[in-house]
Image (cartoon, grey):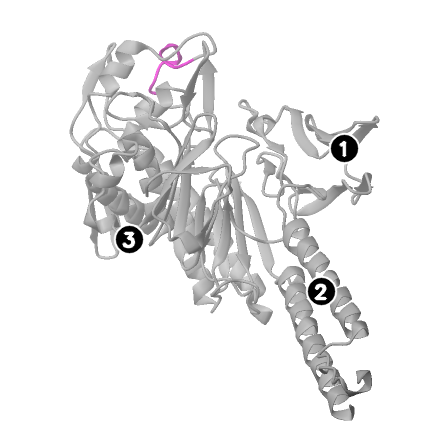
Amino acid sequence: MSKQLKTTNKSLIVVSALMVAVLLSVFSTSCYAPSGKLMTYFDYFGTISEIAYFDEIGSEEKALSDAIQSALDEIDQAISLSIDSSDISRFNRAPAGERLEISKHTFNILTMARSIYEKTRGAFNPAAAYLIDLWGFSPAPSPLIPAELRRSALSLPNKAALDVFSSNLLSFDSISVSQSEGKYYVTKPADEITFMDKTYSMMINVGGIGKGYAADICNAILADYNVTHCYSKIGVSSLSLGSNSSPSSTNNYWKVKLNSPRDGLDYVSVLSKNEGASTSGDYENYFMFEGKRYCHIINPDTGRPIESNLASVSVFGPSAAECDALSTALMVMGENGLSMLGPDYRDVKYILASVSDKIEIRTNFERNKIDIPSSVIIKNG
Amino acid sequence: MANNIETKPKIFKKADLIIYGALAAIILSLFIFFVFMVSSSSALENVYADVDGEEIFRYDFNAKVLIIRDDDFPKNIVEDDQTITIILYFEDEYNKITIHKSGSVYMEDANCSVSHDCTYMSIKKTSDTIICVPHKLHIYATKEISPTLG
């Protein structure tokens, strides 16, 4: 009888200890929030920049903040269309065939943009700047384009202008970038066209890759300060991820929540670390005209806003800059673009979303790295 | 005869089972609460408004309380049963924010730029944000630092 009592007490203690352990683990994973530092900037790229890090860097905090701010400022000064002295503004004003000295950032961005232009067969094309401007989506409308040619509240862009600029000055691979003795240069293509008594040469807009590039640079600066648990986000759609220091994370992955391409609907989240990410969608910037939706992503081939069935494309890959450009290219190419991307992007992960009554997604994420609500329909990856 | 019947020893006594049952019920309820309630991203608990990184106000949807964090920032507040409308002034410009106490926030109006981008934004779940870049105004629903995209 005494032995039986002892056995019962022992099992009670063991079971109770197990239950307490379960309780503690539930509490620790639910309540733990890693303390981090979030730096927010509003002065660059016409949007918000968020740099978050979770490693202790002691007295170097101010130096890190200054280095990040300085880099964001340099990149913005180099590529912004709203800044007259930027490399891109000078390129756009320059006569055809002129060679200009540019910053290392602009050199890097143009080199990468040219490579992706070729790999996506022109679906990502920074030279579509005239078309973006005519459709009213440029952050700084060019003085070269007469206002009456642009989209207004009462009319779509001038059709003849759209036809001209969707057939000319779009060969982005004809720009030439070079470096010599520590200096960087771009040579503007010699092509010119005349339309309505005005002469036009190539105009470019690197907004489709610049924010991703800036996110990559910010994460590289964080790495210089031995910060590995971090992320840098420029605007709402360009993200460069380090790893996650939270003990509740799975293998130091970040759980990245993706915003739904249509308001109010549940959408997916994915596990990601040490890579870049970007989303392009028809919902970010668009206008309605006579009941039809026109989004800010222009198909260079047609000169018109895309009309694919895709509402958003999210891409996770080696760098935020590449993901920025690829997400735009896939929005232009549609679902068939996946087969056209080629071997360079075989490891890129994607989520393509189309919307009817419900959201339908197509993804190549491993199922244990993506959380898909039951309301979202999964098509073949 | 009855006295010779051997009864098998019970592994658990009735009192033990009651304790196990109670512990299991507590664990189950805590699990449901933390996993399904706390981690839910759909229900808004708070909303915060910062200007250039400084918190101006926050609203607690559970307590239905507006907390002003910067008394000196120029603003106008009108409250009724359903909503609180807050106008933040930036010299000659403004942002008009409406908090629906049922759990959503809208930028009703602003005169900060030509396109008034922020007036297309709203907060209905914790991952949503409203950003007015010219006024460095950031309205968001969670202090948790985690990445979102799109």
Mark 1 → mark 3, Cα distance in angstroms: 45 Å
Mark 1 — residue? B101
Q: Tell me residue A203's x, y (percent).
A: 28, 29
Give the residue type that dot 3 points to.
Answer: Asp
Mark 1 → mark 2, Cα distance in angstroms: 37 Å
Q: Tell me residue A15's x, y (percent).
A: 68, 76
Along the line of sight, the residue nearer the viewer: A202 or B13: B13
Q: Chain of mark 3?
A: A
Q: At x 38% / y 19%, what residue is drawn?
A: A135
Mark 2 — residue? B24
Q: Secondary structure at mark 2?
A: helix
Answer whether residue A310 is visible to the viewer in this image. Answer: yes
Q: Secondary structure at mark 1?
A: loop
> In the rendered view, would you say B112 is above or below A37?
above
> In the rendered view, would you say A284 is above or below A323?
above
Mark 3 — residue? A347
Give the residue type that dot 1 points to.
Answer: Lys
Q: What stretch of residues is rendered in magenta?
A: A144-151
Give the residue type that dot 2 points to.
Answer: Ala
Q: Tell me residue A11's x, y (percent).
A: 69, 81
